[in-house]
Amino acid sequence: FYRDVNDPSPNRQAAAVALLSVLNPEIARPLSRALSSNPGLPIETRRAAELAANLLSRFGPALNYRLLVFYSSTNADSRTRAQIIRERLLRERFPNAVDLIATDSTRFARLGAPAANEVRFERNFEDAAAEQLVRLLDEYLAFRNEHFRPIPVDLGRSDGVISIFLRR
């Protein structure tokens, strides 16, 4: 890693920061800031490092996950809230997929219908990402006085997906 960060190749430096952002976002953030302000690096590398620092700052560990947004297929307001979430995430350059999933009452019943807006995540694996996501979602829908609560599940592994359930 140290060799790649100090390599004159901008691609190797960017790859090293990208790897570190997955392994430890708290360390990657200051390293990205340092690279973005290094006058000895090509401007492309500095811009890429600055973008990485901004993404890490905004999304934290949540940037490593695909998001599934479950909303009621029979409720236009639920669909609108799901679209607002996806549009805000994409506008802020969230790097992974944000899939909107229209869900009927039968499927909601199988998945566990949410009594409130929920972020469901794997306990002990995705806690920090879920906390950051709850903060972002509360911010995105604050004008509607919407709030989210984290709901841990216990699968014993992370599949790289965090689910957002919108109440009906």
Image (cartoon, grey):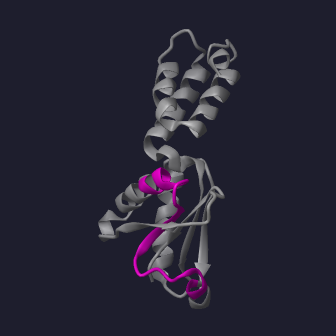
* 109 left or right, relative to 151: right
Residue 160: which quarter of the image? Answer: bottom right
Residue at 50% from the left image edge and 51% from the top image edge? 91
Residue 23 colored in magenta in the image: no
Q: Position of residue 118 (x, y in %)?
A: 45, 70
In the picture, which quadrant includes the N terminus?
top right
Where 2 falls versus 113 (above or below)?
above
Q: What range is drawn magenta here? A: 108-131
Front-lying residue, 112 or 41: 112
Front-lying residue, 29 or 46: 29
Q: Position of residue 50 (x, y in %)?
A: 50, 29
Residue 162: which quarter of the image? Answer: bottom right
In the picture, which quadrant includes the C terminus?
bottom left
Q: Position of residue 89 (x, y in %)?
A: 50, 54
Residue at 60% from the left image edge and 39% from the top image edge? 22
Front-lying residue, 101 or 17: 17
Residue 111 colored in magenta in the image: yes
How many discs appear? 0
In the image, farthest residue toward the bottom: 106
* 148 left or right, relative to 82: left
Where 128 falls versus 14 (above or below)?
below
Q: Position of residue 114 (x, y in %)?
A: 46, 80
